[in-house]
Image: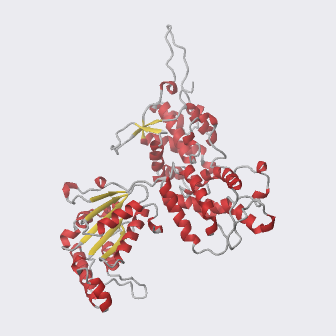
Amino acid sequence: MSSETAGYEQLAADISSIFSARAPPFVYVNDPVSPRTTASVVNSVLSTLANASSFRVNHAQVNAVACFTPRILYDTIINQLAGWTVKWEEGCTNWGEERWNDSLDGFFHGLKAVKSHNRSSSSKKGKAKQMQEDLVDEEDAQIVIVVERAERLQEMADLVVPLTRLAELTDLQLSVVFISEVPWEDMRPAFGGSPDPYYVDVAPLNKEALERRLLSAFDRTSSQIEEPNPYHPTLRPFYAQFISVLLDSCLLYVQDPNELQYIAAARWPGFVQPVLDAYKRRGEDVDMDTEHDDSGLSLPREDVRMRLIRIFKPSFAAALNTLYPRLDHATNWAASNCPEADLLMKPPNQTQPLPGADGGEVDAAVGDDKIGDLPRMSKFLLVAAYLASTNPANKDLRMFGRGLDEKKRKRRAYRTARGGGTAKPPQRVLGPNPFPLDRLIAIFGALLEENDVDNRLPAPEYTIPGERTDIESARVGTYNTIVELSDIGLLHRTSAPDKLDAPTFKCGISYLTAAALARQLDVPLNDLLWDPA
């Protein structure tokens, strides 16, 4: 199994079977979780097919984010298909004696010129190599163009239709592959300009597949290691156990293997450091197994492993809370969260777990294990959702807005019902009300501005009051967090799933849960409720 395709064996098999014969002219690969990883897997499979002797595949892979103009896109594709490397010393000239980037028609001629160039180059090879390759007619050689982040082509709308019909327009044995995180229906050109693609849907990886992929990354690193360090081959079984515990803590919130590998790279050196410290003490250590490799490095006993897991597991939430939104660099975070020296030399009853994302897990009053290790921004969103479902919409300005005189917020005045009537029960007893997405974002921003300013890292580039809060509220990660909270049932979507305009939600947590989260965030929940009774 190739390390590049670990965990994506089904996708690799699908791509290999598609391009092992006459491929369809247009293929659409949809991966909503990790399109970058999918693009690397597709590139690895096509490179393997290109090196096979039974058939020819000449492929180019471009990123629509980097190729943000048609000319850059044309030149990048033609240079890769021709095997040409642009060099600064040579004036950054492109392949060929003509310019192929002036128009779409010039790009078509450039593809045909590359086809003729590759055919003439193969005819000049030695006889032995030529006899081996004569089994395949050169006219049947496939050209494959892979476009990563294809949804960005919508900024160059005139290119989508020609690219999807490129085989038809050039009359070449050619296939175009779009890789995107959005489904084809969301970027399909109007009026049926593009043909229906051969659709490949990439499902999120399960825990077993993620373990295989993360372990393959460890193997690639450990193959270059000789001296004992965190990635020594002897520590692979211990790393596998660490990955299993890490996925149990983070998989509910993050499914991207690149993000999980980033978190693992930040936490693993500190997690295994007590074992390496024990190895350096050698004869003084009594916690290691007697069997070891030639270097003298050995694995800790099972009770020592369980002890390390108990100490470090709460810090996985801190890593997720800081590293997933990229609030800190992995190296800096690992350096600031190193364990104390000689950790294993202390008695087990004197070692305490490392602090989590907010100094511990959610209060026992929460009663829902789904939110035990939520990141800090997710907790703010849940508190904001509870306020949006409980307070009347026309009272938000009175509860969160402030005038020039900085008057105190006014809550509902309580009056006794006259004439023997009964008072209306509070809204939190009646159940949550639906609220639109923009109202949730507005309350979320108000909570951040009032209760999160002191916990932020210094940012001198923000000079306008409230500017940083507005940027934080408008981040793509904030909207992604709302989707994740909806997927795990902490928010309930009340609008149709296919409705993209103004979706509505209901809060899925109870008052006790919201109160526990508010205590962790130092948010005065009862002061913000219009009817706290």
Which residue is found at the position 60% from the left and 47% from the top?
452
Q: Which quarter of the image is occupied by the C terminus? A: top right
Is 469 in front, or is 287?
287
Image-based side of 91 in relation to 234, left or right = left
Identify the residue at the far right of this view: 284
Question: Is 372 placed above or below 251 here?
Answer: above
Residue at the far front in the pictured view: 291
Q: Is residue 125 visible?
A: no
Q: Quadrant of the rendered structure where residue 460 is?
A: bottom right
Query: Looking at the picture, how far across and down is residue 255, in whole percent?
Result: 48, 54
Place of residue 455 in the rendered image (x, y in percent of width and height, measured from the top left): 63, 50
Q: Is residue 227 left or right of residue 181?
A: right
Location of the N terminus (image quadrant): bottom left
**What sort of colour scheme is used for the picture?**
secondary structure
Q: Position of residue 389 (x, y in %)?
A: 47, 33
Quarter of image, res 403 = top right
Q: Please name the residue shown 32% across and 92% down the image.
A: 126
Q: Is residue 331 visible?
A: yes
Q: Is residue 107 above or below residue 452?
A: below
Total tally of numbered discs in the picture: 0
x 33%, y 43%: residue: 499
Answer with left or right where residue 193 lies relative to residue 290. left
Q: Quadrant of residue 434?
A: top left
| Most distant residue in the top direction | 419
Front residue of 113 and 307: 307
Closer to us: 487 or 45: 45
Image location of residue 32, percent across then percent down? 40, 55
